[in-house]
Image (cartoon, rainbow, N blue to C red):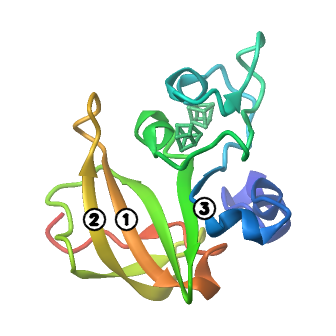
């Protein structure tokens, strides 16, 4: 399916999440990088040595959820926008996602949240808009959504005017 549509099916993307959902009680990076490509900024940018590709730069990145702090640095640095940080908080979930359009949605604004197929599945609240130290073109949006959508939400619908 991913070869034809570019959309990862659920059985594939669920493999990128921790098997124990309690792990997501702390923020963790979820890497959806399915192809073997010569790329490794996720590995080299992580200050906690939580992402491993190794000698062969074509290998897919592997994450060590024990080492990941959910800081989001790899999210800014991934040129493929293939990483998000996800966190369960009570009846909510918080996503940290990359966003490269301007203007950026304002803090406290409501946005439409879409799944991997681009279908709007819920609304979310922008609780923080964060700039990276070295990567000013990519913002890290912190989006609060209902926890039921933690696996399916991938990004937001680009607001009109962006
Ligand atoms: S979120 Fe931070 S700690 Fe986790 S893999 Fe990315 S850079 Fe490393
Ligand atoms: S930086 Fe992004 S695109 Fe490159 S290997 Fe890492 S996750 Fe994949």
Tell me: 15 left or right of 146: right
- For image coordinates 61% across by 75% down, the residue present is 150
Tell me the crowding category of disc 3: few under 14, some 14 to 19, or many 20 or more residues within 10 angstroms, Cα based.
some
Residue found at x 48% / y 66%: 95
Real-space Cα separation, disc 2 to disc 1, in angstroms:
5 Å
Dividing the image into four quarters, tell me where ligand 2 lies.
top right
Q: Nearer the viewer, residue 26 or 94?
A: 26
Residue 131 at x, y percent in the picture: 24, 45
Q: Are marks 3 and 2 in contact (CB under 8 Å)?
A: no
Point out the frontmost of discs 3 and 2: 3
| Above or below, 161 relative to 44 | below
**Distance Cα–Cα, label 3 vs label 1:** 14 Å
State the image coordinates of residue 114 (x, y, percent, origin top left). 49, 76
Quarter-of-image position of residue 43: top right
Q: Residue at x 64, y 68 (%)?
A: 25
Is residue 159 shown above or below 69? Answer: below
Q: Secondary structure at mark 3?
A: loop
Residue labelled with disc 3 = 26
Q: x%, y% of residue 141?
A: 34, 60
Q: Which residue is mark 1?
A: 142
Count how many numbered circles sit on residues in the image.
3
55 relative to 48 in the view: left or right: right
The kind of secondary structure element at disc 2 is: strand
Local SS, label 1: strand
Labels 3 and 1: the sequence-earlier one? 3
Depth check: give the residue in front, 117 or 94: 94
Q: Which residue is mark 2?
A: 128
Q: Is mark 3 within 8 Å of ligand 1?
A: no
Q: Residue 85 falls in which quadrant of the image?
A: bottom right
- Picture coordinates of residue 56, whole percent (x, y): 77, 13
Is 39 situated left or right of 143 in this image? right
Is the C terminus in the top left, top right, bottom left or bottom right quadrant?
bottom left
């Amino acid at each position: 399916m991913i070869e034809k549509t570019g959309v990862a099916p659920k059985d594939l993307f669920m493999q990128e999440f921790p098997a124990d959902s309690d792990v997501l009680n702390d923020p963790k990076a979820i890497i959806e990088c399915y192809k073997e490509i010569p790329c490794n900024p996720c590995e080299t940018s992580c200050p906690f040595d939580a992402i491993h590709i190794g000698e062969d730069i074509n290998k897919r990145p592997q994450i060590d959820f024990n080492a990941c702090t959910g800081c989001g640095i790899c999210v800014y640095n991934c040129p493929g926008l293939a990483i998000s940080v996800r966190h369960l908080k009570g009846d909510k979930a918080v996503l940290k996602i990359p966003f490269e359009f301007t203007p950026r949605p304002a803090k406290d604004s409501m946005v439409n949240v879409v799944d991997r197929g681009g279908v709007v599945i819920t609304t979310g609240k922008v609780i923080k808009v964060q700039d990276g130290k070295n990567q000013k073109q990519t913002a890290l949006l912190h989006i609060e959504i209902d926890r039921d959508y933690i696996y399916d939400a991938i990004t937001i619908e680009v607001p009109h005017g962006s």
